[in-house]
Image (cartoon, rainbow, N blue to C red):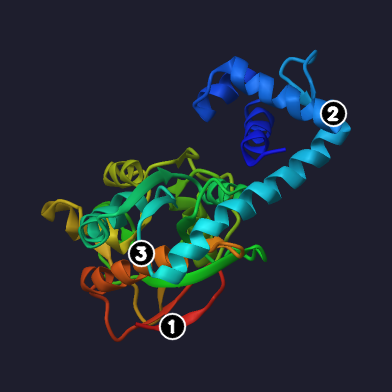
Amino acid sequence: MTITQLKYLLAVAEYKNFTLAAEHSFVTQPTLSMQIQKLEDELDVTIFNRKKKPIELTSIGAKIIQQAKLIVDESERINDIVDQQKGFIGGEFKLGIIPTIMPTLLPIFLKNFMNKYPKVKLIIEELTTDEIVKKLTEGHLDVGIAATPLENEAIKERPIYYEPFLGFVSSDHRLYDHPNISEDDLDIDDILLLEEGHCFKNSVINICKNQNVTDHTKFHLESGNISTLIKLSKEGLGMTLIPYLHSLELPEKDKKYLKEFTNTVPAREVSIIYHKSQLKMQLIEALKTTIDGVIRGAISFHDVKIISPLNKKSVEI
């Protein structure tokens, strides 16, 4: 039994197809099939039911896959332990970022990070929070950046910044003439929301005093893109809330629609998240330090009290 054979097992279990598994393992299909057959012969069991389409695990195969994942994960951590001991910051580093953070945060820190750590091969994916957590748990990601808290015991969270929300209010909206807005002004029935699966939507709903959408609205829309919400709001179809960094990208003529919150400012907690068994701590520290070094200059809210809608945590920034 070899680590390579176990990796081939995991690939077939994931893709449920020998050809696809071979492609993602960078070997020929006959080579992969032969190695798996050799392992089955050695163990004297059938791991995959090849008669099913797609391929299915046998009952004993499912148990073997669980153990194989543990063995492969632990074997790969040997290199992490050595790198950590040597203080080496390099190698492959897989990062997932949620869609409402990716377009504004990535341009702020990426060039700085790559210049500072040229030996790191950074692989970045835009994923929902649920997808990031799943990939962290399965070992397909090293770290994620998402809004927290997640309340997942297997995932560690390290807050890196708090991003205030701003109202985006069109000229024909009831709140346009208000110099500022408060949570009491918000009505969930006239706020444009992101679609399900976005934690930003949950934050917005939690900010509103009345959290139940009624049937009094003329239409109901949920978009996956903050830019779409802004365009629709300008057309008079409702107001929306946007994260502070998104407001920096607005054309100067659109900044008249922005409304700051008075008193306590709602803000989302943005954290670096990783699985509790993660060992690439030198890379995680490098990422956190880089973001810490640039984000404070980007968010110009100072000496205000903010509160996170997801956990009602109050923080001074």
Label located before the other in sequence (2 or 1): 2
Q: Nearer the viewer, residue 25 or 34?
A: 34
Which residue shows up at 12% across the image and 55% down it? Answer: 252
* 14 horizontally vs 218: left or right: right
Distance between the alpha carbons at the discs numbered 3 and 1: 23 Å
Q: Nearer the viewer, residue 156 or 195?
A: 156
**Residue 183 location, x and y as percent?**
44, 70
Of circles 2 and 3, the one toward us is 2
* 270 horizontally vs 248: left or right: right
Q: Nearer the viewer, residue 272 or 257?
A: 272
**Residue 45 location, x and y as percent?**
87, 28
Q: Amino acid at mark 1?
A: Val
In the rendered image, the vertical position of residue 313 relative to residue 121, given as above or below: below
Structural crowding at the residue carrying mark 3, measured as other residues with C-alpha within 10 Å and reported as few (<14), some (14–19) or many (≥20): some
Of circles 3 and 1, the one toward us is 3
Quadrant the N terminus occupies: top right
Q: Residue furthest left?
A: 252
Q: Which residue is mark 3?
A: 287
Q: Are marks 2 and 3 in contact (CB under 8 Å)?
A: no
Which residue shows up at 35% across the image and 62% down it? Answer: 89
Q: Which residue is mark 1?
A: 315
* Quarter of the view holding residue 259: bottom left
* 58 horizontally vs 105: left or right: right
Q: Which mark is residue 58?
A: 2
Q: Amino acid at mark 3?
A: Leu
Q: Amino acid at mark 2?
A: Thr
Which residue shows up at 38% across the image and 52% down it? Answer: 91
The answer to whether residue 185 is visible is no
**Residue 288 location, x and y as percent?**
37, 68
Label located before the other in sequence (2 or 3): 2
In the rendered image, the vertical position of residue 26 relative to residue 124, given as above or below: above
